[in-house]
Amino acid sequence: MATTPTKEDLVERAQIVRTFEASCKIDHPTDDERNFRVALMKKLGTSWGLKELRAVTIQPAGR
């Protein structure tokens, strides 16, 4: 059974979403910037408990 997120959890999640949205507006991202996006996507997917993506692996850029 899932627990209800706390206010702090929701604030952290909102900050991650805003950071992800901002990083996606970079027109020509470097490998480091793409890897940062991947890290944010993994954090969001984990915090949201996306069941359909549990088996998906995302490789960092330039590998």
Image (tube, grey):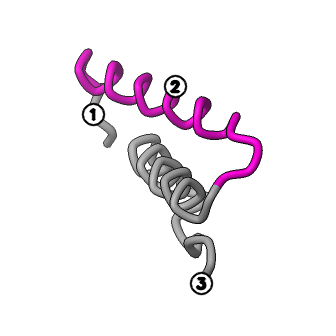
Q: Is residue 6 magenta?
A: yes
- Residue placed furthest toward the bottom: 63
Q: Is residue 1 visible?
A: yes
Tag 3 secondary structure: loop
The residue tagged 1 is 3
* Real-space CA distance between mark 1 and mark 2, rounded to the nearest whole angstrom: 24 Å
Tag 1 secondary structure: loop
Residues shaded magenta: 5-29
Identify the image quadrant of residue 59: bottom right
The residue tagged 2 is 18
Is 57 situated left or right of 3 in this image? right
Q: Are marks 1 and 2 in contact (CB under 8 Å)?
A: no
* Real-space CA distance between mark 1 and mark 3, rounded to the nearest whole angstrom: 37 Å
- Residue placed furthest toward the right: 27
Q: In the rendering, at what x and y percent does residue 58 appear?
A: 58, 70
Task: Please name which of the two marks, 3 or 2, marks the residue nearer to the observer.
Answer: 3
Answer with mark 3 or mark 2, whichever residue precedes in sequence.
2
Q: Are marks 3 and 2 in contact (CB under 8 Å)?
A: no
Answer with mark 1 or mark 3, whichever residue precedes in sequence.
1
Is 52 situated left or right of 1 in this image? right
